[in-house]
Image (spheres, rainbow, N blue to C red):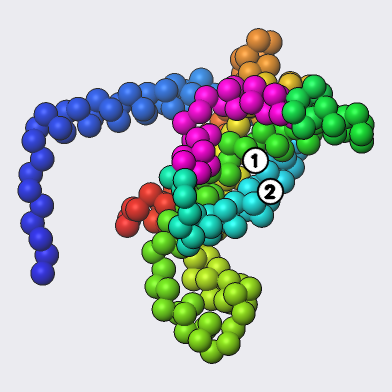
Amino acid sequence: MRTTKSPAPRVLLVLAGLALTFLVLPLIGLLIETPWSELPALLTSTAATEALRLSLLTSVLAAAVATVLGVPLAWVLARIDFPGQRVVRGIVLLPLVLPPVVGGVALLTVFGRRGLVGQYLYDWFGVQLPFSTAGVVMAEAFVAMPFLVITVEGALRNIDPRFEQAARTLGASPRRVLFTITLPMISASLVAGVVLAWARALGEFGATITFAGNFPGVTQTLPLAVYSALEVDRDEAIALSMVLLAVSFTVLISLRGRFLGSRS
């Protein structure tokens, strides 16, 4: 039986149209200002290709770190009740609302050359994480991990626990249940979380420039290259922005049914 949708108040339609216009106009401006004829040359320049290579490398590594650490964390938050759980979840999700530059400063206080942990890494092993490619990966993983955790935790809470209970009753070990029952059941959400984490890492700017700096070939990712290009070559900045726009839009469209709840 099909339900009849009630008509929306006209004021809501007007405000929704204004909101859509506000969001779409900057994108239209970007499309209009894009130097389409020069796009291939701009995107194949040495600076652009190096920034793209570094962005792909660091974002994939950051997504891998977020997955290895984030999935167990999501499982703990979803399946184990412990004192202070809400506080822990709030800390885990804090990078979602924390200004990225503040995240970069926080990373410096811990992993900087004189930081709480960084001083020992440098004094004992000669390892300096800030202003290095490894620092880029850390900054990107810091801001991207909550996207994976919140997606996987929600999936774990929504699956039917009877399948896992049946497997344990039949003698399966907790590890076997995890890898043969639990993870396959949430595979769609897990993929969505990984892709979202990767996309967030790819677009990270504030924490990266604060913690890792903006050094071409070492820490200058695509968003940082856009920032630098704005000062010397506006067309190159727009061309690089189009790459990030295309990736972001593709990710959102491809995951609309798994993360955004869309059915169309």
The range drawn in magenta is: 87-111
Near mark 2 (Cα within 10 A), the count class, few <14, some 14-19 or many ≥20, is some
Query: Who's the residue at 42% across and 73% down the image?
Result: 161
Name the residue: 77% across, 32% down: 117
Say above or below: 42 vs 1: above
Which quadrant of the figure contains the C terminus? bottom left
Q: Judge whether residue 193 can be spotted in this image.
A: no
Task: Kindly state the secondary structure of the residue where label 2 is placed.
Answer: helix
The amino acid type found where label 2 is placed reads: Val
Instruction: Check contact, mark 2 vs mark 1: CB within 8 A.
Output: yes
In the rendered image, residue 74 lying in the magenta stretch gets the answer: no
Which residue matches tag 2? 65
According to the picture, the residue beneath numbered tag 1 turns out to be: 141
The amino acid type found where label 1 is placed reads Ala
Between 91 and 137, which is closer to the camera in this rendering? 91
- Left/right of residue 226 with respect to residue 152 in the rendered view: right
Q: Residue at x 52, y 71 (%)?
A: 182
Q: CA distance from mark 2 to mark 1?
A: 6 Å
Locate residue 243 relative to residue 163 in the image: left or right.
right
Q: Position of residue 160 (x, y in %)?
A: 40, 73
Q: Position of residue 56 (x, y in %)?
A: 70, 41
Q: Locate residue 53, reporting x and y percent.
A: 75, 38
Quadrant occupied by the N terminus? bottom left
Circle 1 packing at 10 Å, graded few (<14), some (14-19), many (20+), is many
